[in-house]
Image (cartoon, rainbow, N blue to C red):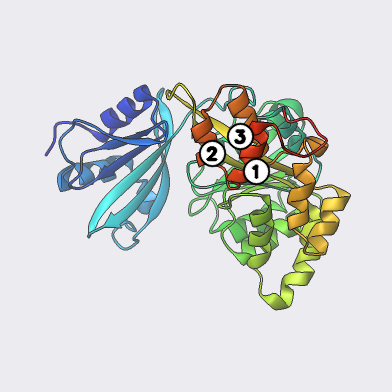
Amino acid sequence: MSDYTIDSILKKAHELGASDLHFMVGEVPSFRINGRILKSKLPPVTEDDMMRAIEKMVPLSLRDKIYSYYDSDFPYEIKGVSRFRVNLAMSFGYHSMTVRLVPYEIPTFDQLNLPKCIENFANFDNGIVLVTGVAGSGKSTTIASLIQHINKTKNKHIVTIEDPIEYVYTSAKSIFTQRQIGIDTTNYIDGLKFALRQDPDVILIGEIRDMETVRSALHAAETGHLVFATLHTFNAIQTINRVLSFFPPSEREVMRSQFAEVFRGSISQKLLPKADDRSRIPTFEILFTTPTIKDFILKDELEEIYKLVQKGSYNDMITFNMSLYNLYKQGYISKETAIEHSDNRNELMQYIRGVYSGSGKMEF
């Protein structure tokens, strides 16, 4: 048995500014810092270390289930340090933990280097806004900053349905009902169904995972609520395709029409290493649904959407390449980083060489 505790390692992760801790039997504890995995100099985790961590961290409501469930998600907190989102999984027959650090303070738009136009998503009265990206791209933090902006500026009832709850909100102008899957409600579908009976104005869905959750989210948006949700997609076009692909072909055209009516836009993001290599900065593709874009969705002409956004700051929209170009031009990221993370490198090189097309300005 090692002489460290899970709390001491989590406190160290917080001190180092880590985003995640990896804690698994037979391996040394490892931290993810600025996107990179760094191994600690601590001894490898033993089975006893893991069982002590489980006994310390796992909620009583899950204690009996962790030996029959292969995967569990739950929150944990060290008072005065941080909150944590914990995933407990199995690997080679042993438990392993991945722990995401969730700060108490919700960052502002400026602190997150979010474009000013993102504030517009908080001003809708209804519809659905999707925040997308791979795991660890900052989706939850961006969506939390939007919810917090609404909390501070508008008199709303905000209902969150999460698995597990990440950021905990303190009511300002708005009031909150925060519900955790498995503790406060059975699943996202039931949570959404009953949320509509709780007089909400804004609903946050932690993650869209299946057809019925999409259907429930669209219904909530259709009945006059503003819905925020996350998806694991890379860009705006893939996001639209992904939402519609949840449905069988026989339903897809009907759902396309319903989605086009309530879709207010999307924020797709990635986190990139800054030029100083000491922190990371987000890059974005931002889409606001205009009548023209709605028409493209209805006609299934999604490639035309990219061409419209590509014209340059049209209705505050921006493509990833435009965002990458701006970050490079302003010295935040290196040319190599910009090119590495571009999904259309030839186009980005045209921007860098100054031969891009489009009538709009490139900076935001």
- Secondary structure at badge 1 equals helix
Residue 326 visible in image: yes
The disc placed on residue 347 is 1
Question: Distance from label 2 to label 1 (Cα)?
Answer: 10 Å
Residue type indicated by callout 2: Ile
User: What is the x, y in percent for residue 281?
Assistant: 54, 29
User: What is the x, y in percent for residue 253?
Assistant: 77, 71
The disc placed on residue 324 is 3
Which residue has dot 2 on it?
A: 339
Q: Nearer the observer, disc 3 or disc 1?
A: 1
Mark 3 Cα shell of 10 Å, populated few (<14), some (14-19), many (≥20): many
| Quarter of the figure with residue 42 | top left
User: What is the x, y in percent for residue 254?
Assistant: 79, 70
Residue type indicated by callout 1: Glu
- Secondary structure at badge 2 equals helix
Q: Which residue is pictured at 81% across the width and 42% down the height?
A: 125
Of pointers 3 and 1, the one earlier in the residue sequence: 3
Residue 160 visible in image: no
Of pointers 3 and 2, the one earlier in the residue sequence: 3
